[in-house]
Amino acid sequence: MSAVVALVAGGVYAVNATPANITVCAAKSNGAMRYSASGGCKSAKETKLLLGQQGPAGPAGPVGPAGATGPAGATGAAGSMTTQSSFEIKTSSYTLALTDAGKFIYSRSSPTLVIPNNSAVAFPIGTRIDVGQLGATSANIIYVTPNGGVTLNDQALNSSGAAVSQTFDRGAFQIGVLVKVGTNEWLFLRSPDENSSTS
């Protein structure tokens, strides 16, 4: 059983019933009310009232303001330092490969380091390769040589040419940088002292 209490026209009505909605009939002449167990009223003389009936849902309310920003998270662990890969040239001539990108290539002898045409080895523009001359005598010179169709721009000599080999000066323990700046164009950066070129 469920109990419904209603205040209608100055009177309090308490009705025990199992239905969720209770029917009350109000007389049109004097407002007197009665409970209708059958759920029906005299249509000509009474007004039918339903107590406990659920009305339609109202419109959604406005969205509330955004909450405050939460606290900053903890600082992550420090990353580990990466080590540059290196490769030693031990032959008289070595042609650069895609796997050499970002490496430190060095020699203790006097090899020719060949820069290939883009049609053979397509290094991305911006590729950097470090070159080290570690030979202990003036005879241990690395010759950086562009292949046919490749231009090697040289900072030290302020020159360029598709058939020009560039070298460090005639001394040991030097380093330079090769950077690809165009489809078939490279820049060779190194110290300019006592530099020589060989055609």
Image (cartoon, rainbow, N blue to C red):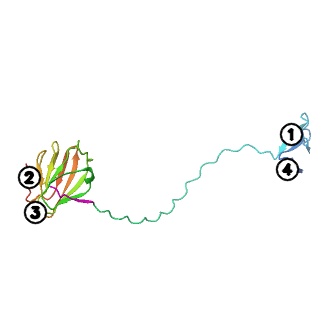
**Secondary structure at numbered mark 2:** strand
- What is the crowding at mark 1: few (fewer than 14 residues within 10 Å), some, or many (at least 20)? some
Do the numbered discs 4 and 1 sit on residues whose CB atoms are within 8 Å? Answer: no
Taking the image as drawn, is residue 104 in sight? yes
- Check residue 145 for magenta coloring: no
Quote the CA–CA distance across marks 4 and 1: 14 Å
Do the numbered discs 2 and 3 sit on residues whose CB atoms are within 8 Å? Answer: no
Residue pointed to by mark 3:
171
Residue pointed to by mark 2:
197
Quote the CA–CA distance across marks 4 and 3: 108 Å
Which amino acid type is shown beneath numbered disc 2?
Answer: Ser
Q: Residue at 23%, 43% (x, y): give it.
A: 120
Name the residue furthest front. 91
Give the mark, 2 or 3, whose residue is nearer the N terminus. 3
Q: Position of residue 75 (x, y in %)?
A: 43, 65
Which amino acid type is shown beneath numbered disc 3?
Answer: Gly
Which amino acid type is shown beneath numbered disc 1?
Answer: Lys
Q: How many numbered marks, from 0 up?
A: 4
Quote the CA–CA distance across marks 4 and 2: 108 Å
Give the mark, 4 or 2, whose residue is nearer the N terminus. 4
Q: Position of residue 125 (x, y in %)?
A: 26, 47
> Which range is magenta?
85-91
Per the rendering, the mark at residue 48 is 1
